[in-house]
Image: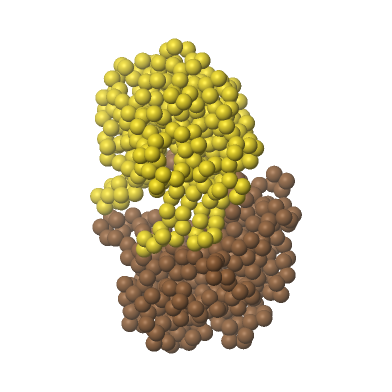
Chain colours: A brown, B yellow
Amino acid sequence: MGNPFGPLPAPGTRPFIVEVRRGSQVESRHPVIAAVVDADGKTVAAWGDVAQAIFPRSSNKALQALPLVETGAADAFSLSQAELAMACASHGGEIRHTETVAAWLARIGRQPDDLECGAHWPYHEETSRQLARDRLSPTSLHNNCSGKHAGMVSVATHLGEDIRGYVSPDHPVQRRVTAAIEDVCAVKLAPGMVATDGCSMPTIALPLHALAHGFARFVTGHGLAPERARAARRIAAAVAAEPFFVAGTGRFCTAVMLAGQGRFIAKTGAEGVYTAASAEAGFGIALKVLDGTARAAQTALGGLLEHLGWLDEAGREAIRPLVEQPLNNWRGISVGSIGLAAPGF
Amino acid sequence: MGNPFGPLPAPGTRPFIVEVRRGSQVESRHPVIAAVVDADGKTVAAWGDVAQAIFPRSSNKALQALPLVETGAADAFSLSQAELAMACASHGGEIRHTETVAAWLARIGRQPDDLECGAHWPYHEETSRQLARDRLSPTSLHNNCSGKHAGMVSVATHLGEDIRGYVSPDHPVQRRVTAAIEDVCAVKLAPGMVATDGCSMPTIALPLHALAHGFARFVTGHGLAPERARAARRIAAAVAAEPFFVAGTGRFCTAVMLAGQGRFIAKTGAEGVYTAASAEAGFGIALKVLDGTARAAQTALGGLLEHLGWLDEAGREAIRPLVEQPLNNWRGISVGSIGLAAPGF
């Protein structure tokens, strides 16, 4: 009890390491690059080459949600905080998630088939099995990105734009999103850096430190136009107030934000990405596990939160099993753990 | 068509890299260490520090099966080639797998509950969903290691030993397995290197090159006592003849052995391990993805097989989509690929 996760090695040009232990040996190692940046763009701490471009994937959904508020769509459709949080979510497809998106779509006169994210079995295993037990198949509502897509469809609907093809980089919906990310992260996104995400929307590579800088600006409003700062604050407040709707049962995004009691936001992205930001501290965090492994990303974020002192004792204890992760086998026998490597590994 | 996987960089002290591409960018990178060793223990080719100890996990199940043949249990119970292959398997829990193990146990007067591997949902997704649709839960038969455990129970049953606790390192069943691995790999296994595997059996760390050496000896019989060499040949022949029972539908172990038309055996282990061996070539291969990621291990093995020329044109084309893996998103749109990084990445 009480001992911190870590400590991390001193910041520097080398990644830090998350290790997977079995018995008394280290079985696998995950190198992590990370940047902590303030709203002026000053790098407060960095590990590894943080000028390197990475795909944020779902870690920047809060930024992608800006047009939803800025165009007036969120007000026009009276979006709740839970719905706004779902626009920023990679949810588990639990019933409260799918029902929230279904009701939202119905209210704006749209249907699940209007979402261009594709369908996949819910990330939440028990929900997935129950769907199979009920002899049902997943729909676009179960896609972890369905809330983000409902947000995009809401914008197009509110502005009277054709919703078809809203995932294309050339659709006005995406052009607004790209412009918002460029503004908030203070970068010019290069066309060659555009790729397609799992849910068919564009994902645009940008330097890791720019992503951290963007999140510092997002939560503080520092350097943003007043209307954009207001929209960002509203989105961040919704995410912090409704962490269940951002991820779900057993998920680290939800657990870590509950542990932070609203003092920061945090969001995972596929291929080992995490972002977090605190208005109080004035910092944004962005990290990437270089091999893309999710199990290491949550441990890495735990170490960074500890390094920055963003968690109190109760918060730290609440997330400890998701950061210093015990590994149990199929019979529940302890066989190892995942945790931060000691500095100078 | 026709272009090889790779080429790999020249052997040396650096790992080679499997990369995950999205659009025109590399999104994630997996370093791989690998050893190709002949039956005399001479390293034919190596990438990275192959003296480093790794946990073989399930990659050495064929070695763990030696006592099953050597004690006479396989003959006493008239094990089929499919059953012998299942003793060396990490199977998908498909119906042909579970029925084979169930029939084997019934024939020797044992039951699924005698297996100490624990239960998990089948690796084969459609089988898993069908189990849920049928409102059933998985049993120890569905555990990917159930065939190996049936082999261990067969040995104890044949020799009149108490089967309870057969997974413990001190049980005679495990002592025989450890002695066989030490002999075949020509190493003395250090006690501090013993950990517990996912299925509750011991897994013992050994240098990567020793694992490759062991597989070269296993398939050639070179340097082994005649009875051990015979047992090894019989096990290798069963694995090569029944690749479905070693893994299953859609799995790389099965596909690559089918592509090799019996000329080599290959087996995955958890945390990014692969072994392979060819009696014809006289070489064993062992590789470990340093971050433990399975998606990179199969690509790495594909590159090594190409490097060694173990696949003909038809075999190469058959496994190409599992080596140069296309990445499609939830709507089936191509978003990237997994493949070997060019030398000098």
- At a point 39% along the width and 62% down the height, the residue shown is B333
- At a point 54% along the width and 60% down the height, the residue shown is B25
Query: In the shown orientation, is residue B13 left or right of residue B63?
Result: right
Above or below, comparing residue A342 to residue B148 in the picture: below
- At a point 41% along the width and 76% down the height, the residue shown is A166
Above or below, comparing residue B133 to residue B292 in the picture: below
Query: In the shown orientation, is residue A245 left or right of residue A25?
Result: left
Which one is in front, B89 or A262?
B89
Q: Is residue B243 visible?
A: yes
Which one is in front, B165 or A132?
A132
Q: Is residue B194 visible?
A: no
What x and y, as percent, mark residue B111? Answer: 30, 30
Above or below, comparing residue B161 to residue B60 in the picture: above
What x and y, as percent, mark residue B273? Answer: 50, 38
Q: Which quarter of the picture shows residue B251?
A: top left
Query: In the shown orientation, is residue B324 left or right of residue B121?
Result: right
Which one is in front, B175 or A261?
B175
**Number of marks present in the image shown:** 0
- At a point 54% along the width and 38% down the height, the residue shown is B288
Residue at the limit of the structure toward the top, as seen here:
B226
What x and y, as percent, mark residue B152? Answer: 40, 25
Above or below, comparing residue A114 to residue A120 in the picture: below
What x and y, as percent, mark residue A287? Answer: 61, 60
